[in-house]
Amino acid sequence: MLSSRAQAQTGSTPRAPGRPDDESREWLRRLRAEGPEREQALAELHDLLLRAARFEVSRRRAAAPHLRGGDYDDLAHHSADDALVAILAKLDRFRGDSRFTTWAYKFALLEAAVKVRRRAWQGREVPLDAERWPLFAHRGSTPAEEAEQDELLTAVGEAIRRRLTPHQREILVAITLDDVPIDVLAERLNTTRGALYKTLHDARRKLRSALAEQGLEGTIP
Amino acid sequence: MTPSADRDSTLKRLLGPVGPEVTCDECFDHLDVYVEVELAGGDPDAAVPGLHAHLDGCPACREDYESLRAYVSR
């Protein structure tokens, strides 16, 4: 929900929370209509979603260079299809705090981004090794540098080892050190992005708490 | 990246943001408002408290934010 302060700062076309602008209201009316009018609105919305999905797939081509041109367009079409289904299921949750099209675009962009990430990792092993983290503690540092500046790094390593559960260590290392996309990890572990982020969040809180106990919180970059 | 910058970047990824942050679901729910307020020159962090911190801690949501911002402002 927009705060009143932010509402006053949104520029030349302020919109009261929960009150869609004229264009957004027209989208809602047509999508809730029946017959040809609704069919036409669905076709127009799908076209908008497809353009957004193609934009996203194009942005992420570098992440999946092995895919062919047709694969990308298939991904964009599937993303637009899935986004349309999601939008229609959540249409009553659109409150009018943004333009309807902005609200709708995020569904297409999310679907496309998730699909590209998953395709990019298709067939690749996801590293899940709770004991792999000590390798990081020595990465890129000389012994002299470690002696000078890595008290914090050592403390983090100790906290990872002593304070986190094996599951928390796996998730923390996979997402933050091995750059495994959270959607990919969620799919492999048969869980959700939200649940994994909660695990990551809890692990980070434990690490910060451990550092605070040692008086090291002020040295965190 | 220098070893020092690499070390700092690694620590930031490991330790995440400071302070309250929204969840991934809440981030998605409010991303459209956040981006519109930002592009209109407003204060998105006041509009959706905790979302900026989440973007600092969640690489996937950060990518989603950057995509929506880029697409809407194209």
Image: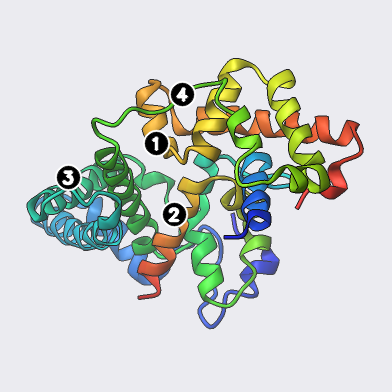
Disc 4 from disc 2: Cα separation? 23 Å
Disc 4 from disc 1: Cα separation? 15 Å
The chain ID associated with circle 1 is A
**How would you rate the neighbour count of disc 1 (Cα within 10 Å): few for under 14, some for 14-19, many for 20 or more?**
many
Residue under label 3, please give it: A78
Query: Which quadrant is home to the N terminus of chain A?
Result: bottom right
Residue under label 4, please give it: A128
Tell me which amino acid carries mark 4. Answer: Leu
Which numbered mark, 2 or 3, is in the foreground of this view? Answer: 2
Residue under label 2, please give it: B63
A149 w.r.t. B46: above or below: above
Q: Earlier in the sequence, mark 4 or mark 3?
A: 3
Residue A97 visible in the picture: no
Q: Earlier in the sequence, mark 1 or mark 3?
A: 3
Disc 2 from disc 3: Cα separation? 20 Å
Disc 1 from disc 2: Cα separation? 12 Å
Residue under label 1, please give it: A183
Tell me which amino acid carries mark 2. Answer: Glu
Which numbered mark, 4 or 3, is in the foreground of this view? Answer: 4
Q: Nearer the viewer, residue A37 or A127?
A: A127
A53 relative position to A194: left or right = left
- Rendered image coloring scheme: rainbow
Tell me which amino acid carries mark 1. Answer: Asp
Q: In the rendering, at what x and y percent does residue A111 appear?
A: 30, 46
A3 relative position to A19: left or right = right
The chain ID associated with circle 3 is A
